[in-house]
Image (cartoon, rainbow, N blue to C red):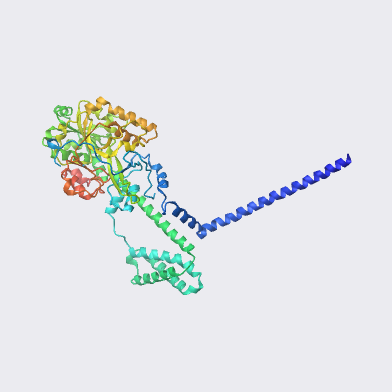
Amino acid sequence: MKGGAGGGGVGGGGVGANAAVSTKRRWRGFVIAVLGLVILSMLVPLVFLLGFHNAFHNYSSSSGSGSGFPSQQQASSDSQEHIEKPDQEISVHSGINKSTTKAPMQDLQPKGSHGNPLEKDVHKASPEGTSVNISSPDAVIQIAKGDERLTLCELRFGSYCLWRREYKEAMMDVMVKKLKDRLFVARAYFPSIAKLPVHEKLSRELKQNIQDFERMLSESTTDADLPPHVEDKLWKMEAAIAKAKSVPVDCSNVDKKFRQLVDLTEDEANFHTKQSSFLYQLAVQTMPKSLHCLSMRLTVEYFHTNPLDVEDSVTEKYVDPELYHYVILSNNILAASVAINSTVIHAKESRKLVFHVLTDRQNYFAMTLWFGRNTFKKATIQVLNIEEYNRVPGLLLPQEFRVTFQSAHKLPRLDYKTEYVSLFSRSHYLLPQIFKNLDKIVVLDDDIVVQQDLSPLWRINMGRMVIGAAEFCSVRLGQLDKYLGGVNFNRNSCSWMSGMNVIDLARWRELNLTGTFRKTAQELKRKGRLPEAAASMASLLAFQDLVYALDDMWVLSGLGHDYGLNLQSINKFAVLHYNGNMKPWLELGIPKYRSLWFKYLNRQDQLLSDCNVIP
């Protein structure tokens, strides 16, 4: 027993020894792991400090798409965040044939329509092989073919880029900027040259030039402040830099400095572009101070005077189906006034014209007084507060969308042509309710100018169609199926433009298009579309296969964004539509088109001078 006990004791001692050995091994492994982490934590910062990570960056860039830009698949995946925004950009292939039959003019018509360029979600959406994208807002227009920098800017910032190109100023203080550039280059090369004893003379030369440049730039912020012999100093610096470039040195430091310069320059340029674009958008979307002054002065005057009661003979005209009824939705007094005045001036029978101006509660009193104190030949004008017919407060004007045409056969050159599509807003779907006693109206946007008699519109037989409009068959519903949420629709239906539209209200009521619009908008919202985007897509769906195509010579669009329209051919069109961001009443409006708008403004009212409305 004792021997057995003793054997058991010896065996237990062996087990204890093995446990101690395994414990030491575990501790040794733990110590090695800790040391490895410490060494790794020291190496990683060294890699970044010495610039070795740039080599990996260069390799990954070059091995991807053959350039420093991300591939098309990578870039398109980054653009998903833009798709659901209310103002939309629709990118389509430009090679679709316009096959719809236009209404003949004859005697019924006037004699005279971040980073990468591939940062878009493109997909095949129709048999024609077109690509479609809906993304962030902002107005764009036709661009010069092959101008890829302008193309990239437009895809990101819209018509701001076109406005910037038109008003581009000469660079100021070019010499100061050149001196700063050369100073940065010299500083990039100097540390590497200073480490080479054989180039001590070049090192002293670089150092001296750097000090001279630093002294000059510390005392000068403009070219006028520079000393008289600055060209000589610049020549010496460039000669020293040329020598430094010929010296074989460790390029990691130089590469790092130049990368910093590129990054800083790109960041600064991107910041200023975004800032300028924001200010541009703010300017085009904000009511000018002069118009705000006019509206406030009229409102105050309205409540200090006794508005005249409307005569019964005038109220009878509001519902007389034998007259020509025009409807304008507007919160801009001057815009509505110009649209009405230009229509009346060219009308053969102004006594038959009745204008119904729909506005919001804020502008109702100013509008009422303005059209009460100003006459437009023998035309009749009625001002209505749309909020009395709508549960939702406010007035919604037609919504405009940027439409980009992309030539799929010319990649990677990226040829684009961009225009606007204007669509009805929710407020337009109240028209059958507001005008219950009328069966036919013409709806005018407030950013139009009429140049010919519009009475032939009332003799057009639209058959079973509901709306007469300028069709936009380059964009068909089949190309937008991804954004229509799987709703049933005719893939061949064209989109159409607001601006000037003939409406058959009787047929509208018969088909209950207002109910169709609301139902479709709700369905699209349930499928994740934003309310504004859902309303726009629902507007296209509500009128599918119910659009009567007006002749192209009725309406010329693009005067609010296209600098390239031919002024000689403009007079041939019956209506000019200033769709786009650069409206004619804004200082940012395109100058050569603004005169066509201002000549129809009634300049005799003293308030226009008091509020500095007249340019």
Coordinates of residue 198 in the picture (x, y in percent): 50, 74
Q: Quadrant of residue 324?
A: top left
Q: How many marks overall?
A: 0
Query: In front: 155, or 405?
Result: 405
Whether residue 304 appears in this view of the structure is no
Given residues 402 and 299, the one toward you in this image is: 402
407 over 481 or under it: above or below: below
User: Which x, y percent locates residue 381?
Assistant: 18, 33
At a point 16% along the width and 38% down the height, the residue shown is 343
Q: Position of residue 122 (x, y in %)?
A: 37, 43
Say whether residue 510 is visible.
yes
Q: Residue at x 13, y 37 (%)?
A: 106
Q: Quadrant of the N terminus?
A: top right
Q: State the image quarter where residue 269 is shown.
A: bottom left
Depth check, front residue: 584 or 245:
245
Above or below, 412 against 236 in this view is above
Residue 56 x %, y %: 49, 55
Q: Relative to the observer, which residue lies in front, 604 or 273?
A: 273
Q: Residue furthest left?
A: 348
Left or right, residue 211 beside residue 152: right
Q: Residue at x 42, y 71 (%)?
A: 243
Q: Is residue 56 above or below residue 344?
A: below
Residue 451: image quadrant is top left
Left or right: residue 247 compared with residue 22: left
